Amino acid sequence: MWSERHGLVRAQGFTLLETIVAIVVISVGLAGVLSVFNVNVRNSADPVVRKQLMAVAEEMLEEIALRRYSGPTKESDAGCGRSAFDDVSDYHLYPANRKVCNVEGVAIAALAGYTLDVTVTDVTLEGVPAKRIQVEVARGNDEVTLVTWRTEFATPTP
């Protein structure tokens, strides 16, 4: 009764112990969420790099597929020139230096961190001779592989 007479009332709020426990619980939860976020960001591919990989692979695949089906085999120069390539098989194991180059064989400086591998193999699709064209473009851990098949769909008349 002494406290009621002197106007003392029990203080409301959190004790120091309750505040520390709340901070610890919130910190553990936040650390868990941030670690999951960090793993997802680290393992996700950069969308700009992915688009560039796809653009290089599509361009090379289209260039090869638009060439004649067969012809005399030509070797690329020591770098990666392909201006003399005139048929699909000329691109087999192109480029020797694995760099992304323009048609004249000049390495594209902006794509210096990218590698390019082309494989052309003879296959048979249900009795029809064909060529399997595989283009792989990579940068670091990111990689794009495109595959198509090419047949001799038309024979030019002399």
Image: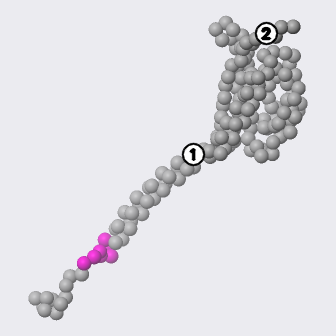
Q: Is residue 141 above or below residue 118?
A: below
Residue 115 coordinates in the image, percent (x, y): 74, 38
Query: What's drawn in magenta, residue-wise?
Result: 12-18
15 magenta-colored: yes
Using the image as rendered, state which of residue 15 and residue 138 is in the foreground.
138
Question: Hey, which residue is sitting farthest left in the picture?
Answer: 1
Residue 116 coordinates in the image, percent (x, y): 74, 34
Using the image as rendered, state which of residue 8 and residue 88 is in the foreground.
88
Q: Which residue is mark 1?
A: 44
Using the image as rendered, state which of residue 10 and residue 154 is in the foreground.
154
Which amino acid, mark 2?
Thr
Question: Of the residues under marks 2 and 1, which one precedes in the sequence?
Answer: 1
Kindly indicate the quadrant of the structure image that contains residue 147.
top right
- Circle 2 — which element? loop
Work out how far the residue at label 2 is from the one at label 1, CA to CA, in angstroms.
46 Å
Picture residue at 73% right of the left edge, 27% below the top: 62
* Mark 2 crowd level (few <14, some 14–19, many ≥20, 10 Å Cα): few
On-image quarter of the N terminus: bottom left
Picture residue at 79% right of the left edge, 29% below the top: 94
Q: Which residue is mark 2?
A: 155
